[in-house]
Structures are given as structure tokens and as C-alpha cells.
Image: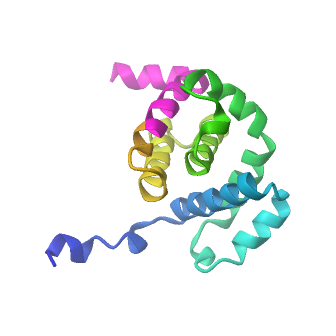
Amino acid sequence: MTEKNLLANPSKNRTPRHRAREFALQGLYQWLLNNEDATTVVNNIRAAHGFDKADGDHFTVLLYGTIKDSLALRDSMAPLIDRNIAELSPIEHGILLIGAFELKNNMEIPYRVVINEAVELAKSFGGIDGHKYVNGVLDKLAVKFREEEVNANKRK
């Protein structure tokens, strides 16, 4: 084992916010597949092993907010994707919903951080090239929700 492998322990490098996104993705996956109500999903996820290391407040806002705004978030993504939303894998669908929600509602988080976090989720849980798809869609969506921030970043 190389020194890099010894130091690269993903379970120790994940921040509480990143863990909140991972648990929110698990909750959205459950919601998308089983169509359970948000409270049931939240309670199931909060009981999961390791949840105590996540930012519980961010998780709650993400999951409830994403489910509540899912129709509007899907409408905002629809023109930017190359297929019907129903044809997306539940993982990429959930990641895109989380990313769209954060871009739209969490202005204190820089758009590049939102996109990077979504890409990391896609690398961990999605298909082989799912992270590229997520990156492309959220990059376009960032312009829609945060045009001023994106343009200011381009000028630098």
C-alpha cells in the first residue's frame, strides 16, 4: 500500500455538510423509489448508522426542501437535460435535485462548491460517467439561478 493510500481515508475526509448531502441523497433515493412521505424518509435516515456525524440541520433543510420544491426544480432542469427526467437514474436524479435546490436556495454556498459536492456524490454513488452529466447540467443551471455570481467568477 502506498503512502497516499494510507492517508486517503474517505470516511475521515468527509465534512458534516458532505455527510448531510450523502444522507439527503439516500433519502431522496428512498422517496423517488417508494414515494414515501418526507417525514417517514427523514425518520428512517436519521436512524441510520453514522448519521450523528452529519450536519443534521443541513440534512433536514435539504431533504424537506428538495422534496417540497421537486416539481419546480425538475421544471428548471428539464430544458437542460437530454432526456425525460423519468429516464434519469434515481441516483443522478437525486443528485441533480440536491444541486438544483442548493443553487437556488443556499446563496451562502458558492456555486462552484455546490457543483463540486454534487460531482463528488455522483462519483461515489452514480454510474461510470454520471459525474460528467451532473457537472454539465448543474453548470448550466448555475447560470440560470446565479448569473451574476457565475459572470463575476468568469471575469477573475
Give the magenta-colored segment's residue range. 133-156
Q: Residue furthest left?
A: 2
Residue 16, image quadrant: bottom right
Query: Which residue is found at the position 65% from the left and 34% from the top?
Result: 85
Query: Which residue is found at the position 53% from the left and 28% from the top?
Result: 142
- Magenta run includes residue 146: yes
For the stretch drawn in magenta, the main secondary structure is: helix
* Residue 34 in picture, x, y percent from top left: 77, 58
Query: Which residue is found at the position 63% from the left and 29% from the top?
Result: 77
* Residue 47 in picture, x, y percent from top left: 71, 78
Residue 82, image quadrant: top right
Q: Is residue 15 visible?
A: yes
Q: Nearer the viewer, residue 123 or 153?
A: 123
* Residue 111 in picture, x, y percent from top left: 50, 36
Position of the N terminus, as image quadrant, is bottom left
Q: Nearer the viewer, residue 8 or 26?
A: 26
State whether residue 45 is above or below residue 121. below
Q: How is the rendered protein coloured?
A: rainbow
- Magenta run includes residue 132: no
